[in-house]
């Protein structure tokens, strides 16, 4: 069998990711290639470039391009209470454990525009834990973080959010937490009372504290396996024994280097509990 | 079966998928030499039972994939609801929660394009019954990568829009009945 010849486009992609890292210090070099290819092809088309190399020229020479490229490389669309059964499981099975601690820290890693963060804050308020909890919402995309901090969403998304919230076992009405105007919903700013927003990279940064719950859903699907191992390693280090880790509905630790540091806690909803030391 | 498989099959189907797949997948022999990726439009907010159904019916094991699921020959891999399934390399799939494409997640186009990138000439892409145009662009990518494109004869399909769109965008595609597709696969990938 002859060695596989790397396609020109794949060479261009690797060079572009290297250029982004050297010029702007964002490291996408260990992202899953299949998604990167798709997202960069989309950017190439939208910026009217004939090739990825042409896109690279723009990215290197026009500093205004990088924030826009981050939109392609990082932002994922989420929903409040996406996969309601996950939040129901947090409510019914994780909260009773958390309620035994006098103070709590929760890390929403890769919080994007904040839908997941606010879902957890509302859930903690409903369950009487918000007052004693500090929420860390982190992402590498500052524009997304600013949107998360603003807490403003299109009104036409609220119907799905409301239905999700109801299915998650919500004891209040989602409409208690926002005001509407100009086709937007503005979330109650008291929901941010105990939230720290921070620029943090699962690729290059370290752990910043001990957590009781880490929720990192549909973020690591964009990483290759080595980078997934790095990120899960951070969560392992951030979680003391019996801390919880929640992943997306189709993410698993089964293939992870760190699988032995966790046990299935609610397997159907991909909630894991830290074991050992 | 040892080593990395040299070839792969990817199938896309929508309305009428269960019956069409039932005419193909159970006939594939236990020593089938390719992985078989399957993308069916399933509702985003409920659990899919496709893998269970076909596990029971087929000689090949069938699973609904998780992110970075290892892939081997002689197994059937279903895309899960509410995610795109992408072929990451010959041995793994990856998932994405990027926006819907043609109102679909999983999208047949997305999966086919990523499979064409990885498998090139070793890929056989098959579009079956369906009521929209998903898959037409993906099948083009299969052909552009040097792979084989097959479309279910629209006259035999429960819903003809998807195979018709695939043929229109991909005139090189071979048009076959479900029985012909099955015997083609048994010949080409056994």
Image (cartoon, rainbow, N blue to C red):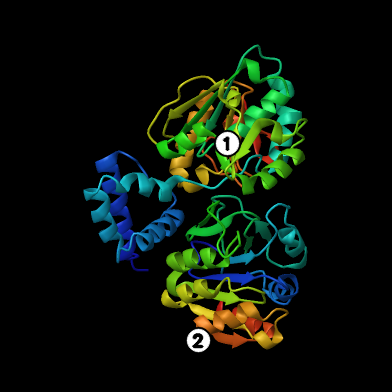
* Circle 1: element type: helix
The chain carrying label 2 is: B
- What residue is rendered at 57% in x and 67% in y? B108
The image quadrant that residue A176 belongs to is: top right
Image depth: mark 1 or mark 2 in front? 2
The image quadrant that residue A127 belongs to is: top right
Quarter that holds the N terminus of chain B: bottom right
The chain carrying label 1 is: A
Whether residue B74 is visible, yes or no, is no
* Residue linked to disc 2: B171
Specify the farthest residue to the front. Answer: A182
Instruction: Let me know if marks 1 and 2 both belong to one chain.
Output: no
Residue A259 is marked as 1
- What residue is rendered at 29% in x and 52% in y? A16
Q: At which x and y percent is residue B120?
A: 43, 71
- What residue is rendered at 62% in x and 54% in y? B65
Q: Is residue B71 left or right of residue A28?
A: right
B180 or B31: nearer the viewer: B180
């Amino acid at each position: 069998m002859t060695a596989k010849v790397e396609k020109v486009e794949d060479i261009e992609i690797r060079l572009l990711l290297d250029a982004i890292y050297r010029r702007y210090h964002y490291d996408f070099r260990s992202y899953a290639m299949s998604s990167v290819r798709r997202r960069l092809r989309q950017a190439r088309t939208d910026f009217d470039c004939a090739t990825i190399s042409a896109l690279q020229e723009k990215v290197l020479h026009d500093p205004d391009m990088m924030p826009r490229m981050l939109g392609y490389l990082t932002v994922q669309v989420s929903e409040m209470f996406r996969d309601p059964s996950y939040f129901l499981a947090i409510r019914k099975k994780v909260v009773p454990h958390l309620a035994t601690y006098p103070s709590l820290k929760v890390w929403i890693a890769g919080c994007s525009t904040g839908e997941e963060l606010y879902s957890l804050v509302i859930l903690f308020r409903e369950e009487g834990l918000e007052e004693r909890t500090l929420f860390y919402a982190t992402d590498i995309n500052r524009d997304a973080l600013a949107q998360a901090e603003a807490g403003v969403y299109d009104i036409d998304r609220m119907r799905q959010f409301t239905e999700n919230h109801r299915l998650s076992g919500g004891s209040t009405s989602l409409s208690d937490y926002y005001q509407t105007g100009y086709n937007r919903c503005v979330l109650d700013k008291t929901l941010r009372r105990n939230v720290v927003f921070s620029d943090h990279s699962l690729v290059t940064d370290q752990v910043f504290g001990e957590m009781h719950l880490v929720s990192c859903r549909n973020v690591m699907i964009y990483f290759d396996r080595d980078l997934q191992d790095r990120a899960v390693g951070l969560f392992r280090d951030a979680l003391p024994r019996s801390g919880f880790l929640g992943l997306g509905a189709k993410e698993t630790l089964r293939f992870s280097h760190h699988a032995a540091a966790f046990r299935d806690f609610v397997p159907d909803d991909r909630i894991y509990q830290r074991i050992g030391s | 079966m040892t080593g990395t498989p040299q070839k792969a099959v990817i199938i896309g189907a929508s309305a009428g998928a269960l019956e069409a797949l039932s005419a193909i997948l159970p006939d594939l022999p236990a020593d089938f030499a390719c992985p078989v990726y399957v993308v069916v439009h399933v509702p985003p907010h409920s659990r899919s039972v496709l893998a269970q159904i076909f596990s029971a019916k087929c000689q090949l094991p069938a699973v609904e994939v998780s992110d970075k699921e290892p892939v081997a020959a002689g197994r059937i891999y279903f895309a899960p609801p509410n995610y795109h399934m992408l072929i990451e390399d010959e041995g793994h799939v990856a998932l994405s929660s990027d926006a819907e494409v043609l109102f679909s997640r999983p999208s047949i186009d997305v999966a086919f394009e990523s499979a064409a990138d990885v498998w090139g000439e070793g890929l056989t892409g098959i579009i079956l019954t369906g009521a929209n145009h998903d898959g037409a662009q993906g099948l083009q990518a299969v052909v552009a990568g040097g792979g084989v494109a097959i479309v279910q004869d629209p006259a035999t399909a429960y819903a003809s829009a998807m195979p018709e769109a695939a043929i229109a965008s991909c005139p090189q595609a071979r048009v076959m009945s479900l029985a012909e597709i099955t015997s083609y696969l048994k010949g080409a990938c056994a």
